[in-house]
Image (cartoon, rainbow, N blue to C red):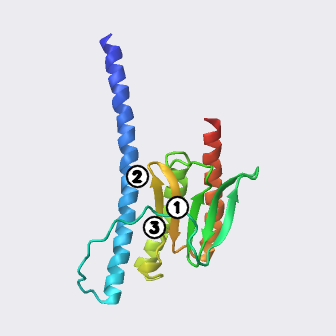
Amino acid sequence: MTERIDEKKLKTIAELRSILEKRIKETATELEGLRIILEFVDAKLLEKGFRRVEMRKVAPAPPASVEPAIGSEETVPLKTVAGDLLANFYVAEDSVRIVPAEDKTFDVNTQPFMPFLVERVLTKMQEKDQEAARTGGITPDKILSYNIIRDGDVIREVAIKNVGSERLRELKSTVRWTLEKMYEKTQSD
């Protein structure tokens, strides 16, 4: 009887370990994003000549809008093979916004969002740009950056800056494939 209890405890501990590993990986990705933003801010401060600015208390901003921004964005619908709208892909000069369709709910924990789209695609592009910036190939303000706007675990928008025209097609097909796989998983549940 005690062996069964010990086995259950061991299994629970192993599951907790797995959860901790996942959270550490997510936190590391978030930390890397914050470092990139800090590098960008530092570069801008140096570029503009740093001077101390008195900070005023500002009322909290309303929640980030998931509606298309007014301006020169091109809207590209991302659809399943069957024609269901997954999301709208808003393309501006050097940025992209992915806004899920109103009738779709995509959870950040649904595969393959984090391991594929975020870690293997966006983070790798970011790392490549960071290396190019270190070697002088690009300026630090041209490093790809992304922000996942969430409501809890539900994805409301993915904003990507410094995309560049050469990455646009790759991102469009990668995002469409990822969302389609996520949608299939929600349909089978």
Cα distance, mark 3 to mark 1?
18 Å
Residue extending furthest bottom?
49
* Residue 135 seen in render: no
Q: In which quadrant of the rendered view does residue 133 lie?
A: bottom left
Name the spot of residue 152 as percent of width and height, x first: 44, 49
Circle on res. 127? 3
* Residue 80 seen in render: yes
Quadrant of the image containing the C terminus: top right
Name the spot of residue 2 as percent of width and height, x first: 30, 13
- Mark positioned earlier in the residue sequence (1 or 2): 2
In-image side of 10 versus 81 (left or right): left
Residue beneath the point at 32% across and 78% down: 42
- Going by the numbered disc 3, the residue's amino acid type is Glu
Cα distance, mark 3 to mark 2?
16 Å
Helix or strand or loop: what does disc 1 sit on? strand
Q: Residues within 10 Å of mark 2 (few under 14, many from 20)?
A: some
From the image, state whether disc 3 or disc 2 is nearer to you.
2
Name the spot of residue 118 as percent of width and height, x first: 50, 57
In-image side of 100 versus 26 (left or right): right
Q: Residues within 10 Å of mark 3 (few under 14, many from 20)?
A: some
- Mark positioned earlier in the residue sequence (3 or 2): 2
- Mark positioned earlier in the residue sequence (3 or 1): 3
Helix or strand or loop: what does disc 2 sit on? helix
- Which residue corresponds to mark 2? 26
- Going by the numbered disc 1, the residue's amino acid type is Val
Cα distance, mark 1 to mark 2?
16 Å
- Going by the numbered disc 2, the residue's amino acid type is Glu
Circle on res. 158? 1
